[in-house]
């Protein structure tokens, strides 16, 4: 008898809660929720759903997409490994990387120093890099700047600002030379004399720069 009373008391206490639940049994979902559910159902019907229905599969797909995008970017900027007679040049969208294409029988270190023999009166001269592999000299007169570099072939690896520039070739002192003008109006000439690689750049104009390049010779 006591058990029956307890059961009835519990039922009467919970009845209002049941009534409250029954009031919301006919809940109307929002249009946004319904659309999302339809998208989910439609996605599961796609033929590729089994390929992306786990975290691991989705991660693999993302990695693959990144690799494809990276490859496409490289192709779009035409990263070329172009072999000139003396140089390998990787041409990218905003810069180029130049390396020697002929390291055989060349000095391991700078054994002979080369200088610009052209008259540079009025320019101040400063050697700001002087190692056994690389030597760089700067010449300045007012707003005019000239940089001259002599480098051992085996360590030469130069990144050049060739954005929107046409890289041309001509001959300096009987040797193939590369020339271009960057987007800061600096002209650059690069050539290999058989022993070393030389880089000459400046804002003095193409013709004057070529005259300087033609005058480069071994220091006495």
Image (cartoon, rainbow, N blue to C red):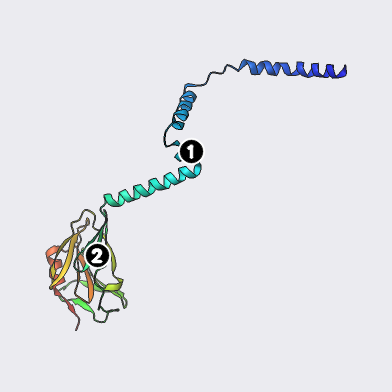
Up/down of 155 relative to 68, above or below: below
Where is residue 141 shown, x and y percent of the image?
20, 68
Q: Secondary structure at mark 1?
A: loop
Where is residue 151 shown, x and y percent of the image?
26, 73
Residue corresponding to mark 2: 88
Q: How many discs appear?
A: 2
Q: Quadrant of residue 143?
A: bottom left
Q: Residue furthest bottom?
A: 220
In this rendering, position of residue 131 left or right of residue 122 = right
User: CA gap, disc 1 to disc 2?
Assistant: 47 Å
Q: Nearer the viewer, residue 38 or 111?
A: 38
Q: Is residue 196 visible?
A: yes
Q: Nearer the viewer, mark 1 or mark 2?
A: 1
> Which residue occupies 42% across, 44% down?
61
Q: Mark 1 near mark 2, Cβ–Cβ under 8 Å? A: no
Residue corresponding to mark 1: 53
In this rendering, position of residue 210 left or right of residue 124 = left
> Which residue occupies 42% across, 37% down?
48
Q: Which quadrant of the figure contains the N terminus?
A: top right
Q: Is residue 140 visible?
A: no
Where is residue 43 shown, x and y percent of the image?
44, 32
Q: Nearer the viewer, residue 59 or 120?
A: 59
């Amino acid at each position: 008898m006591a058990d029956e009373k307890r059961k009835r008391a519990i039922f009467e206490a919970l009845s209002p809660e049941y009534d409250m639940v029954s009031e919301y049994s006919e809940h109307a979902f929002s249009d946004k929720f319904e659309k999302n559910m339809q998208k989910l159902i439609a996605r599961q019907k796609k033929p590729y759903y089994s390929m992306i229905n786990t975290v691991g599969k989705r991660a693999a797909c993302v990695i693959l997409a990144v690799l494809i995008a990276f490859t496409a970017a490289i192709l779009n900027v035409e990263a070329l490994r172009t072999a000139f007679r003396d140089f390998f040049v990787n041409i990218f969208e905003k810069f180029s990387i130049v390396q020697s294409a002929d390291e055989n029988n060349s000095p391991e270190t700078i054994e002979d120093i080369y200088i610009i023999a052209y008259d540079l009166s009025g320019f101040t001269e400063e050697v700001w890099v002087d190692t056994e592999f690389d030597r760089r000299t700067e010449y300045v007169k007012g707003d005019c700047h000239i940089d001259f570099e002599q480098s051992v072939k085996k360590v030469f690896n130069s990144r050049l600002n060739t954005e929107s520039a046409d890289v041309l070739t001509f001959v300096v002192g009987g040797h193939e030379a590369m020339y271009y003008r960057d987007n800061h109006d600096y002209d650059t000439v690069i050539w290999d004399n058989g022993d070393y690689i030389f880089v000459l750049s400046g804002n003095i104009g193409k013709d004057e720069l070529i005259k300087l390049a033609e005058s480069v010779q071994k220091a006495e």
